[in-house]
Image: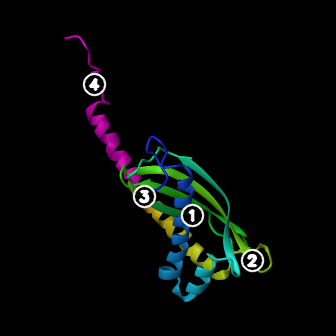
């Protein structure tokens, strides 16, 4: 059972742990599904051997207090288009409460690529840049596709509004306590 406070809500520090665990899984997905040719390289990023990823900062915006028991899903996406010479990148994180089917928190993680042997920041490795670029391109295609669908839904809602209560002669019934 996770750490809970007196009223049963999940301790805020756990949200940062959820984001970190999700980021590890995000990296392992590259190793196992998207770029198995560089599996060892991806996996080494999670350890202090050679090149690694270090969390420079995390900003967490809490949306509502989750309570125990609940299940979560954690989603990561690149915030910006990757640049091959970059020494860092940012990830947007969504922590979703399965019980409530809504965002429990949003985070922004600032990740540094670090060379443990030299003890300093380094740029994205080519295998990382290639996969991050492919991910960014897929995100952008999905955004265009889904934004179009959202605009269609908004137009349909507006038509319903105009046909029902947002038309000439429509009277809003706010109710009354007196009959």
Marker disc for residue 20: 1
x and y, in percent, of residue 143 in the image: 48, 61
Marker disc for residue 29: none
| Mark 2 lies on residue | 115
Label 1: element kind = helix
| Mark 4 lies on residue | 170
- Span of residues in magenta: 150-179
Q: CA distance from mark 1 to mark 3?
A: 13 Å
x and y, in percent, of residue 174 in the image: 29, 21
Marker disc for residue 72: 3
The residue sitting at the left extreme is: 179
- The nearer-to-camera label among 4 and 3 is 3
| First reached walking from the N terminus: tag 4 or tag 1 | 1
x and y, in percent, of residue 136 in the image: 56, 69
x and y, in percent, of residue 40 in the image: 59, 86
Q: CA distance from mark 2 to mark 4?
A: 67 Å
């Amino acid at each position: 059972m996770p750490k809970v406070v007196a009223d049963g809500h999940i301790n805020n520090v756990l949200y940062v742990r959820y984001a970190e665990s999700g980021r590890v899984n995000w990296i392992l997905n590259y190793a196992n599904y998207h770029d198995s040719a560089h599996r060892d390289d991806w996996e080494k990023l999670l350890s202090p051997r050679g090149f690694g990823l270090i969390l420079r900062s995390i900003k967490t915006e809490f949306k509502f207090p989750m309570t125990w028991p609940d299940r979560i899903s954690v989603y990561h996406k690149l915030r910006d288009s990757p640049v091959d010479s970059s020494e860092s990148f940012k990830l947007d994180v969504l922590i979703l409460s399965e019980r409530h089917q809504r965002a429990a928190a949003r985070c922004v993680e600032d990740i540094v690529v670090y060379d443990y042997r030299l003890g300093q920041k380094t740029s994205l490795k080519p295998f990382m840049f290639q996969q991050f670029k492919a991910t960014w391109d897929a995100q952008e295609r999905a955004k265009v596709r889904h934004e179009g669908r959202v605009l269609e839904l908004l137009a349909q809602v507006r038509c319903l509004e105009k046909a029902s209560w947002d038309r000439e002669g429509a009277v809003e019934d706010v109710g009354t306590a007196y009959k």
